[in-house]
Amino acid sequence: MARPLAGPQTLLRTLNGRAILESLARRGPLTRAELMTETGLSRTAVTQVLRMLEGSEAVAAAGVDRETRGPAAGRVSLHPSLGYAAAVHVEPSAAHVALVDATGAVRVETHGPFPPLGDRVAHIAELIEACLAKVNGPLHVAVVGVPGIVTADGAIRDDQGPDGGAFRAALSARLGAAVRVENDVNLAALAELADGRGSELASFALLLLDDGLGGGIVIDGMLHRGFSGVAGEITFLPQTPVPIGAPVLGDAVVRDLALAHGRDPEESVHQHLDAAAAGDSAALAMAAEMGRRLTIVAGSIALVLDPEAFILGGLATHPVLVEAVERVADEYAAQLPMRFLVSAFGPEAPLVGAVQESAAALRATVFSRLVPSVDRGASLERGATGARSSR
């Protein structure tokens, strides 16, 4: 009778090593007993893997557990010098940078406006380098959220036209690290999916209002970017009386609405909404029109994708605008019921998403260097199986 073939030890060590590293990244410092519970591994397996990881400086001693009964047990944690990832949110006039470790904790954070005639790449790199100067460890990867259409290869198409990947390539060369570019609203949607209002939804559409209106679409628990990255460019969905090809909502639109209602066009969207909250009749009329446009955008999406809910993000979380949206949605409820939720992160959602994605990218990068490749182990297993079967 044929016996089942055992996998090679390299593959087992890889799987066990990754399990322990992921547990330490998720839970923080743990004892051997706690690692056994987390991973399901035996004490012998945990001890052997920790010895391997200590030898490669992947883990380090992290004090003693004196809270549980019995003899004090030593804790281990990820090594503090494993390195960092940079999470970047490129705003219209500034960049926000957070330096993240493998546990997902933000270690250093900074924010700086773009110089009027300066190089955007150089400015972002300088902010990241200033953060790195405050910690001990290398930068391995950066995740950058930008406004505009982002293709699968990291090229950006925005108001300045397509860049052919020049931004990503220049920033990667300057930092000496891998750079992933992502649409900022998509990052916001990923933040909601992981830890926000979308974490218990199978599908949702994030409607994020900032200087423009953007959408992040999640279908069956997966972010939908579209074939060329265009999915979510909802600001150009046609609706009366907006001309086809003109934006539905954003800074320029609000300026026009302010002029039409006799308010100062130089005031920000937030200022107009605050005025509406204070009872200003002209500002209330503006908010009603903004709510109508947002709700019609949601209705257009609902007729095509039928998401479980819509999440309002950015400036759309202002209570006055939320109320305006819900009021219009109630008018359409008989024909097209729609559910609206308010973002868990507000204007910070794109940066939260960048932090989450950069931490995951850092773990994937660093952990693959610390333990043998799973793919390599699998190929060895296939090779061993093939050798045995050919005899």
Image (cartoon, rainbow, N blue to C red):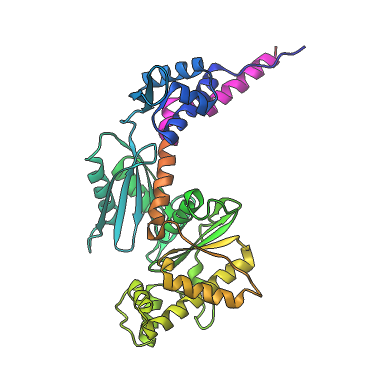
Percent x, y for residue 271?
A: 32, 74
Residue lying furthest right:
1
Q: Is residue 77 visible?
A: yes
Magenta region, main secondary structure? helix
Please give the count of numbered marks on the rendered protein.
0
* 359 left or right, relative to 292: left
Q: Quadrant of the C terminus?
A: top right
Nearer to me, 346 or 171 = 346
* 14 left or right, relative to 284: right
Residue sitting at x 33%, y 34%: 83
Q: Is residue 389 found inside the magenta-colored segment of the image?
A: yes
Percent x, y for residue 289?
A: 47, 80
Work out whether 366 lies above or below 86.
above
Q: Is residue 245 visible?
A: no
* 230 left or right, relative to 267: right
Residue sitting at x 30%, y 56%: 95
Nearer to me, 261 or 159 = 261
Residue lying furthest front:
69
Work out whether 73 lies above or below 98.
above
Nearer to me, 91 or 329 = 329
Percent x, y for residue 192?
A: 48, 54
Q: Is residue 318 found inside the magenta-colored segment of the image?
A: no
Nearer to me, 233 or 315 = 315
Work out whether 142 lies above or below 102.
below
Q: Which residues are magenta?
A: 364-390
Percent x, y for residue 195?
A: 47, 49
Q: Quadrant of the N terminus?
A: top right
